[in-house]
Amino acid sequence: MDNRPSRHRHVRIRSSRCEPPGQRRLPRREIGGALVRIGLLTEGGYPYVSGDARLWCDRLVRGLGQHEFDIYAFSRSERQEDGGWTPLPSQVSRVRTAPLWTVEDDGPVHGRRARRRFAEAYGELAVALCTAPEPGSPRSAPGPAGPEADRFGSALCALAELARDTGGLVGSLRSETAVRALERACRGPRALRMARAARVPELLDVAAHIECALRPLSLDWYEDDGLGSVDLCHATTGGAAALAGLLAGYFNGVPLLVTEYGVQLRAHYLQAPDGAPSVRALLASLHRRLAAEVYRRAACITPGNAHARRWQERCGADRSKLRTVYPGMDASRFTDVGESADCADPRTLVWVGRVEPSKDLISLLHAFAEIRKEEPKARLRIVGAAEGADGTVYLGHCRALAAQLFPDEAEGVHDVGDNPVSFEEIGGPEMPDLAEAYAAGAVVVLSSVVEGLPISLVEAMFCGRATVSTDVGAVVEVIGGTGLVVPPRNPRALAEACIALLRDPKRRERLGAAARARALELFTVEQNVAAFHGIYLEVVSHTPVRRVLVDDAGEPLPFGTPAEAHLPGRWTEVRTTAGRPRWASPPGGGTAPVRATGPVKEPVPTAEGAR
Amino acid sequence: MSELGELDRPGTPGSPGAWDARSEAWLVGAGRAGRGADGPAGTDTCAGAATDGCGGAATDGCGGAATDACAGAREDGSPATGTWAAGACAEHDAPTGSRDTPWGGFDADEAGRLGVSGAGMVEGVHGEAFGAAGGDPRGDSGTAEDANGAQGGDHGARGEQHGSRGVSRAETSVDSTAPVRAPRSHGAPSAPSATSAAPAESATPVGRPVARRGAVDPVKALMHRHHDLCEQAVDPLEIAAALEVHGLTDRAAARFRHRDVFSLAEEMYARVPRDGDRLPPPPNSSAPLREHWAWAAFALLPGVLCAAAVMGLRSTEGSPRLAVAAVGALAVALALRMALGRGPLRTPARTTPTGNPVWTCWLLAYAVLGDGLLRAALEGGPDGPWPMATGSALALALAFGPAVWCARLFATGARRRLAASRGLEEFASSVTPLLLGLIGLFLSFLGALLALCGGLLGEPAPYAGTGSLGGLLLVARLLTAHGFGRTPAVVLGIAAAAEATALATVFAGRLPCCAFLATPVEALVDAGGANAVPALVCAPAALILLIHAIRTLTRASAHAHPPGSP
């Protein structure tokens, strides 16, 4: 079968399952007797040097050395592919990649039957996309999915099966059949109001976008030796990666775990091109339904923060499947600063971050002006560099404003003065590294008006600093009760909170210690890895993949998988101490895990056992 | 909010209007004052509040019922009522004129009894908006100062006694007594009291509450700020995403009396005025094909080279003539290859290679050499070089320019029709005449060129054979250029094979006992001349391809962007 519009780089590094059972190498670090083979699905991510969540995935894979990882990666661009991979640890047994940015349209042209199947499935998909949701239907309510979700899911499944059976889906998705089905659905009853206005060019656009979104359907990853052989699919993002996991679930019953640190659907809304309203409406519908289908089928969903969680709930994720796993950060850099006593200048405020308009440094400067009225000795250090043209211009504005608000001042008449507000960058002589930056201040301030999960706040918490931040994004969730939070765009509130902390070193210390404790509990790498380890085992134990074994003729073998196969531990392990009772084996000689049953005899090969 | 159906929502305000002449007069004045950049902040506040209130009330169809105030009243009476729209919709159907208390059952006595709510309302005026903050969850626990609270309660009561027209007056008086700070120009309408995760830590006394530019309907003000976003949004979630990017959190959404950003976005999405018949503006005609005009020069190159080669052929004899012919053929072939690599006839990237070039070359070679060879073969030859149909060659080479031009006309015409047509059927029916017309145009060009070349070179013009060959090649190339390369390859192959067979039968007829093989071709040539063979081969092939083209090239998907670039 040749249904691959992709140029795979299929690297088989080490695959212990390819060895005959007798010679199978035992994993050295078996914990709890379970070895999980995880299909890690990434999109524009992990193995590539320029990947998005590269560090996180790398820590995860390295942290879970007791499991096996198969990596299935989508690359975003040619440049990314040319950039190469990061060095992979030994637990990665294979890597398969497929590009999302190009397509080779040389699959076989569908025959009559395949065309009919395609037209049927695509028609269903188009109707599901173009149909307006029932008015008044509670979208966020968990529970059994409505007929619409079923319709979309079954259409998707039918298309995937068609792609697996005959290939050539890419050409069909852009064919006249597809456009015609879209047109019919747009003109049909209960169609979206905006979809009704779609003209021919818009229909073509939509068909092209659908083809792009459904490219994972045409891959050859879902064979029995591909994603069919893993115990668990872990999609590190939504979108294409999760769709691949979804298909593995369709075809092989592999459970799917979806991790989203930023909700893909939301990113889609924000990046939506300025197309015609009908195109945007239909694409939004497509991505919403895809996300809903992924959430519906996933065994477990791990949002990275409460914000992502809310979005996922809104898009139909069942609340019982959601498990927030905060991203982990390397805490060791900040250990020295966090553990040592506060030796900073007690009147210094520090702001750390990337200088951008959304950080609202102007507001911070105004707040600092108020602080200076009460605390004339206070100083403000703004640490960070500007990125991009916008940031540079903004930094210039901030410098100008600081120079206007605060004239240089000196201790005495003969001293050289300097400005109470300093703009610095990491790596300068005064601030060699990030931890030093946090250590320099008694209070760390965050004045953003827009923020996702504020990294600088987490770092400040690791450093054990008292913080004052604005109530945006996930700030409250991160800080808990261990820092002060004020409304955004409110310099006076910010100033008063800062003054309160500057005047109260005891409270500062208390808050800092609490913040560090909270950060160590919630935001460390170890926490992240341990959480995923637990989730893996839980998902695998709840939804084990039952594979039907077939014999040479393709007939299913009723008892092909013996009951022992489901026991913890490796039942196929070679008994080196055969013939001797267990207690007679030399102490410490065997590394075999404790079994729940008696010793199993040499396993009978499945094919023979059935004959 | 999400549990409200469409019918429960208040009507969407379409335009700011006033509900009576008096308030309109006031509104105009206040609006003008408010619009002045340096106007006093108090006036500014009033203007904002009143404009929004008027607009909302007037177009809601609630008449004099100040919807937000109603909502506020409701909120005080039964704290669980929730949202602005919920309060407003309760008033939606009630005729105004027949009601004694347009404030929705909230009268002065009740106001006096609910002293707390009066204070809450005053706090609202200071902080946010008159009606809006009446239902503010924090309203009851507001920290308004006592004097202001009493005063405000008084004003509030008076306002209620005045009924509907008291709205603006009550606000005016309250605002005139309240200390007003000029609002930030771009500031979000945010609550003055600090919302804090650790209230004990940071419950700082915020002096006197600061009056902000108020809005009776805060959602409306928000919609005004995000006007473009609301207009263009295709989905409530899109508005929600954009609002979050602008820094609006769930806690901020609580000030709009919504549980979260999503329900706020849903209300905004539902309240955007949309006239169902309005179509999106048609796309600004078809984007011009952005390409260099080099293809035009390249399209003429084969004709020029072929003309030079023909002149060379006619002026030379013997072996130099052979060399000239070889060089000329090579040059024309290279020029054709270059010309086909760009312009409207180029094949899309990553198409499967077909045998097209081979068959095309064979067919062209037959058009130039085949007729002479056939005639010579039938007469028992060929003895030495047979005559070449240089006229056909020249006409075909010169016709390449018009062919490219026709292809371009087809591409632009199809694109224009694509942008204009509303349905696939409409597009197909408008493109078919274009296709047929352009092929007819090309054939007439080719005929004229054939006649011209024949006249110039003194040869008989083989209209039927060469004409149908030209048509065949053009349609095949058009199909290939639009990504349908398989059928043309097959048809061209069959045509080439048929011509080769015709030649081969003539030669095979010379074998003993095989004379019957040459009979059909002989009969054909006797009836219609040597040119009848290519005519009989190419014309049906061209017809078949034309029918195929009418079926495929009139599809919209044939004119979509190439795959890989959505």
Image: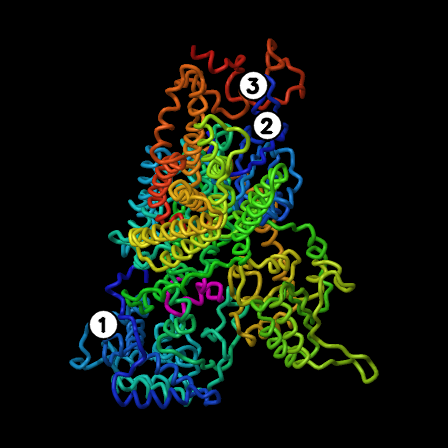
Judging from the image, what secondary structure is the residue with disc 1 in?
A: loop
Q: Which residue is mark 3?
A: A21
B525 or A151: nearer the eye? B525
Residue farthest along the left direction in this orientation: B98
Distance from label 1 to label 3 (Cα)?
A: 76 Å
**Which chain is home to disc 1?**
B
Number of residues whose C-alpha sits closer than 10 Å to that of mark 1, classed few (under 14), some (14–19) or many (20 or more): many
Distance from label 1 to label 2 (Cα)?
A: 70 Å
Kindly identify the residue that appears in the image at 30 percent across and 87 percent down: B24
Residue B92 numbered mark, or none: 1
Kindly identify the residue that appears in the image at 35 percent across and 28 percent down: B523
Q: Which residue is mark 2?
A: A15
Q: Is residue A52 above or below residue B78?
A: above
Q: Which residues are magenta?
A: B242-261
Number of residues whose C-alpha sits closer than 10 Å to that of mark 3, classed few (under 14), some (14–19) or many (20 or more): some
A405 or A600: nearer the eye? A405
Q: Give percent across and percent down for residue A315.
A: 39, 52
Distance from label 3 to label 2 (Cα)?
A: 13 Å
Amino acid identity at mark 2: Ser
| Left or right placement of residue A290 versus residue B203 in this view | left
Q: Is residue B252 magenta?
A: yes
Give the mark nearer the N terminus: 3 vs 2.
2
Amino acid identity at mark 3: Pro
Q: Is residue B187 magenta?
A: no
Res A114 visible: yes
